[in-house]
Amino acid sequence: MALEVFLPRAPEPEFGRVLRESLRSDVDLRVGPDVPTPARYRVLVAGRPDLAHLEASPSLEALVIPFAGIPRETRDLVLRDFPRLAVHNLHHNAAPTAEMAMALLLAAAKRVLPGDAALRRGDWSPRYGEHPELLLEGRTVLVLGHGAVGSRVARACAGLGMRVLATRRAATAAERVGDAEVHPASALRSLLPRAHAVVVAVPDTPETDGLLGEAELSLLPAGAVLVNVGRGRVVDEGALFQALRAGRLSAGLDVWWRYPTGEETRTRTPPGDHPFRDLPNVVLSPHRAGLTDGTEALRGAALAELLNAAARWEPMPNRVDLARGY
C-alpha cells in the first residue's frame, strides 16, 4: 500500500527534484495548494500548517516540519488540538549552519570587519598599536547544544587546537563524546567562566528562552566571543548589547529578536531594539547560516529519508518532543 504524502506548498525546484529522485516508488507525493480528494494522506509536510490541512485527512499520522526546529504557533496548535500527532523535523542544514558558526567565530575573534573597513579607506592603523584579536589555539570553547550543528562545531574547534566543552539536554553526567567534554545543561553556570568562546546552537524552547542573561554573560572572561546560530531569544538582547558596548565581549550573530513581517519590510527592519550596527565588535548576519547553494538539495534528500522510512513502516527519525519544544 502506497504512502500518501501531502505538501501544500510547492517545493523549490532543486528541493523537488532531489526529493522525487530519492523517494521510493511506493510514496505517493501530492503537491498542493488544494487538499487531495479524497484526503487520505498519512504525512503532511508543512512548517506552519493550516488547520484545514490538519483536519482534512482522517489517516493523518505525522507532520513533518521541512526545516530545523518547530515554530511556536505550530507547536501550540498541535499540542492543543492534535496531541497524538507525531511531529518530525529536518536537520539538513546542520553542515552549512556549523560552517557559518565558524565563520562568525573567526571573524569576531580576529576583528576581520573593522580591519577590512579601515583598509578600504587606506588606513593601516589596525596593524599597529594594541591587538585585541583573540588567539583561539589553546583556548576553551563552550558549545551550547551538542547536536547535529554543535557536534560539527566541536570538531572544527578541536581542529583549531581548542579545548571543547559542550552541553546537551539529554546528558545526565559529564562524558567524553568525540572531540567534546559534554555536560548536562544544568552545568551551564559552572562552565561559562572557563569559556573564551561560546557558540549557541540550541533551539528556542521554554527551557532555553533567556538562557543567557546578564548574570550568565557576566560570568564569561573579559574578551570572550559569543556566537549565536541558534535563536535570538536564547540570549537576552539588552544584556548582550550592554556587554558588547562596554567592550567586555565580542560577538557574531546570525539570529535576532526582530524580523521583517513581509517582503515590503525586508530592507528597513532593524534586527532588535538596540543599535548593534553601531558596535565595531559585533559581526551581523541576516539569519542565513543554513542558506547555501546546496541547501535545497540537502533538504530534499533529508525529507526523502524520512518518507522512505515511513513507507517501509519504520519509525521516522527526528521526532520532536512537543512538550519540550524540540
Image (cartoon, rainbow, N blue to C red):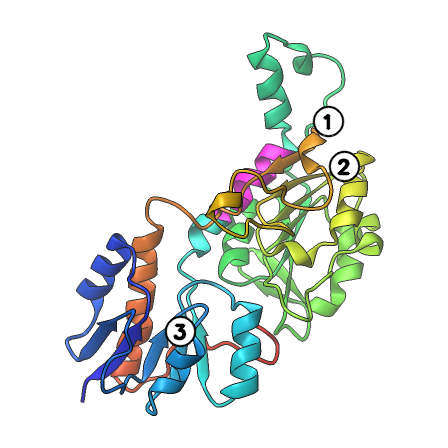
Classify 161 as above or below 316.
above
Q: Secondary structure at mark 3?
A: strand
Q: CA distance from mark 1 to mark 2?
A: 8 Å
User: x%, y% of residue 145?
Assistant: 60, 61
User: In the rendered image, which residue does mark 3 sit on?
Assistant: 64
Say if mark 1 contacts mark 2, CB within 8 Å.
Answer: yes
CA gap between label 3 and label 2 equals 41 Å
Q: Looking at the picture, how far across and down is residue 234, in whole percent? A: 68, 58
Q: What residue did someone put label 2 on? A: 223
- Which mark lies nearer to you, 3 or 1? 3
Tell me the residue at 22%/84% (across/down): 37
Left or right of 90? Residue 121 is right
Quadrant containing the C terminus in the rendered view: bottom right
Is 101 in the magenta? yes
Residue 259 x, y percent position in the rendering: 58, 50
**Circle 3 Cα neighbour tier, 10 Å, few/some/many (<14 / 14–19 / ≥20):** many
The quarter holding residue 29 reads bottom left
Residue type pointed to by label 2: Gly
Q: Which residues are magenta?
A: 98-108
Q: Residue furthest front?
A: 264
Q: Residues within 10 Å of mark 2 (few under 14, many from 20)?
A: some
